[in-house]
Image: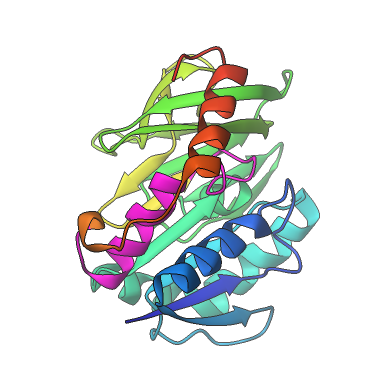
Amino acid sequence: MILRVCALYPDLMNIYADRGNLLMLERRCAWRGIDWRLHESGLGEPLRDEHDLYYIGGGQDADQRRCASDLLEHKAAALHAAAARGAVVLGVCGGYQLLGHSYELGEETIPGIGLLDLHTVRAQAPRLIGNVAVRTAEGTIAGFENHGGRTQLAAGQEPLGRVLRGHGNDGHSGFEGARRANVIGTYVHGPLLPKNSWLCDWLTARALGIEPEALAPLEDSLERSAHAAALRAAGVSD
């Protein structure tokens, strides 16, 4: 098997240790004997629909503006085509916001690509910061959130999960992230996948078109400890 991964703007959208998500995917593939192919797609590069998993991390507002314009011009069509055929698209924080319709910064509106039915507004209020735990249909995600945007899901848009501890999308709805088939968006950093190895495996399996149980088991004592520690930091028992 080969996992073909495309990292979007890894030089710009890479705060809060988000590059650790790519390292986690690569290491767990290597340990299982799964070939790994990584392509990094930057500004000005047309994107081709030829990967199994597309990833975009978080960035500062200035970098997010640059990437938003480039996404629409060079990459949106390929990402929509990839999502339609079942490829995994994962967006974290700023990347999550760009998967929606728009991100409003005062009088300015940064356009998204509309893979998820949501919009985000930068609130004139304190940032939503702290440890977070989220219950999803597949398992519990733990990590760290730090965002000024408040994300509103449209009617019918499925959240990624329910907040057990922390703020989530907007601090009051109880929802965190969003999902549509294999398109996943979340505010959870930490980075996300090293603290949630089960989620790394779930994404890998979805990208390969197999069930997670078909992946070879690994000796995951350290990974389980990291997950448990992240849950405890959020005030949730393992």
Res 149 visible: no
* Residue 63 located left or right of residue 202: right
Which quadrant does the N terminus fall into?
bottom left
Q: In the image, residue 13 lies at what x, y percent?
A: 70, 60
The residue that appears at 76% across and 69% down in the rendered structure is: 11
Q: Is residue 197 above or below residue 144?
A: below
Query: What segment is highlighted magenta in the picture?
Result: 186-211
Taking the spot 46% from the left edge, 51% from the top edge, the residue there is 101
Please give left or right for residue 105 compared with residue 178 in the image: right
Rendered location of residue 210, percent (x, y): 20, 66
Find residue 4 and report its image quarter. bottom left
For residue 156, side relative to residue 22 (left or right) = left
Where is residue 88, by image quadrant? bottom left
Count of numbered tags = 0
Residue 198 among magenta residues:
yes
Measuring 56% from the left and 78% from the top, which residue is drawn there? 73
- Does 13 appear above or below 124? below
User: Is 55 in front, or is 45?
Assistant: 55
User: Is residue 11 inside the magenta stretch?
Assistant: no
Where's the C terminus, which quadrant? Answer: top left
- Residue 131 in the image: above or below residue 158: above
Above or below, comparing residue 235 to residue 149 in the picture: above
Tell me residue 192's x, y (percent).
56, 45
- Asked whether the viewer can see residue 143, the reply is yes
Residue at left offset 44%, top offset 37%: 177
Colour treatment of the image = rainbow
Q: Residue 94: x, y in percent? A: 62, 49
